[in-house]
Amino acid sequence: MHRRSFITAAAGLAASGGLVAPAIGQNTRAMTLRFVPQANIATLDPIWTTAIVTSMHGYHIYDTLYAMDGQLRPRPQMAEGHEVSADGRTWRIRLREGLRWHDGEPVRAQDCAASLARWAKRDPFGQILAQRVDSWGTADDRTIEIKLTKPFPLLLDAIGKPDSNVPFMMPERVAKTDANTQINETIGSGPYRFKNDEFVAGSRLVYEKFDGYRPRNEPADSAAGGKIAHMPRIEWHILPDPATAAAALQAGEVDWLDQPLPDLIPTLARNRNVTVDVLNPYGIMSIMRLNHLQTPFNRKEIRQAVALAVDQTEYMRATLGDDRSVWRECHSLFPCGTPLGTEDLSPVNAPPRNLDRARAALQASGYNNEKVVIINPTDFPLIGPHGQVTADRLKRIGFNVELAETDWGTVVQRRVRQQPTDQGGWSIFHTYGSALAYLNPAISSIVKGPGPTGWFGWYTSPRSMELVEAWLDAPDAARQLALANALNKLAQDDVATVPLGQFTMRTAYRKNLSGFQKGSMPYPWSVRAS
């Protein structure tokens, strides 16, 4: 079902009463924040997955040692402070006194060392850091001691990163779970506790204020600062139908709609009880990811044919409509408008980019009609139309395409599979993320090529990893830019990832709410009701 027809059908269903809004007890109205996330949550483990909705969940119940403020500076969070040895090879991070887990146990340095070790196995920035770590240890119960084989000046930037694979701290027993296995215990030390007894998969998640949380004695500032839980209770209501979610917000049946469908924004903006706002000032990048391990995209020439077939305008219009004030084309793999966002470094991105050129490239590539399986969510309006556009364009240039449409949770679970498509694997998926997730070589997962241990798609390029290491050790900004451009061009040449455009996403909430923090995702602290 295409985007426009989906909206029309959804609106009709909502008007007919075909979908029932969540029941709300009036006696708890002022005590509960009812939030509609961007999508259903497929896993509760924010280290195992890069799904933004799971990171959002993580920010409710977990905390971090350091966190980025609104100026993208790492600031102490659970940490009291740190010291670095003269040779730069030993870092000691001191925990604040009195931190406790939700089960009442004290937070220890041993918990945090184990959490960092598990996180570093999954996160691209963490993997780079781990190559220089000799040991994740402790000096005492309140002091984490990280010993390095060589200096790593960006260590605080790594452990304070704000986006997907956030280095959340967990109890040691949980953090010792194999990094490739999802955790089954949700115990954190953050401002809210997860209510396992009220969790209904695919329908509702509930968080309760943790009275044992000790916020920092300073103002909240994006992901950093004093995280004060003003709302005693937060409920997530999974409403995959956009029109139903918007109707519930207008009726006061929910309080905050994370990502309303762009077509519904004008209606929401006209409602005197609703505020439409931009909470992520950094913008968002949409991307297509190809499976580099399996045929046919284990061949660069075939990947290049896909890149040539992409018309970013068509992708952006399919999800965001014709209002170009909220989206732009961007052919860089670092965000446009940032210091490293250089476009058209590769001949693959040079115009003309059209179906005729793509068709000729595919015919010359040796493609042998292998099946291309596109895994695509039907319940995610900012992603689903991309899969439909890709399926149409690839069929038109000669690919044998299967569009496997499911819910987002199934896509998240399936994209981890490295097997061939006839064994449950995949060829293409689409997603998006905050520009902060792709800001530079250290952070971004879409330009690095560590192979089977890397991000889904498993791009393999030893040269890319050499360039990342050189970027980390670069003596000045000019050298960093040159190395970033070289990496950007290499990733464009290799079609490590296909960029689909860059946009700004709006959120909507009831006007009685205030205190929202700007950042890469919706943070639950500081929000209050009047």
Image: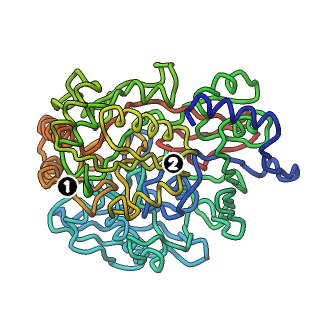
Number of residues whose C-alpha sits closer than 10 Å to that of mark 2, classed few (under 14), some (14–19) or many (20 or more):
some
Q: Amino acid at mark 2?
A: Glu
- Decide: few, some or many residues near mark 1? Use Cα within 10 Å; few <14, some 14-19, many ≥20: many
**Left or right: 400 with respect to 236?**
left
Residue drawn at 55 percent across, 43 percent down: 380
Mark 1 residue element: loop
Viewer-proximal residue, 73 or 524?
524
Q: Residue furthest right?
A: 27
Residue at the disc numbered 1: 460
Which label sits in the foreground, 2 or 1?
2
Q: Which percent across, then down, holds residue 169?
A: 46, 66
* Nearer-the-camera pick, 298 or 312: 298
In-image side of 257 versus 71 (left or right)? right
Q: Secondary structure at mark 2?
A: strand
**Viewer-closest of 530 and 259:** 259
Taking 241 as reference, is 82 left or right?
left
Considering only order in the chain, which callout, 1 or 2, is on the residue closer to the N terminus? 2
Q: Quadrant of the C terminus?
A: top right
CA separation, marks 2 and 1?
A: 28 Å
Q: Does residue 224 appear anywhere in the picture?
A: no
Q: Which residue is mark 2?
A: 405
Which quarter of the rendered picture does the N terminus lie within? top right
Q: Residue at x 79, y 38 (%)?
A: 252
The type of residue carrying mark 1 is Thr
At horizontal 58% and vertical 28% (from top left) the residue drawn is: 262
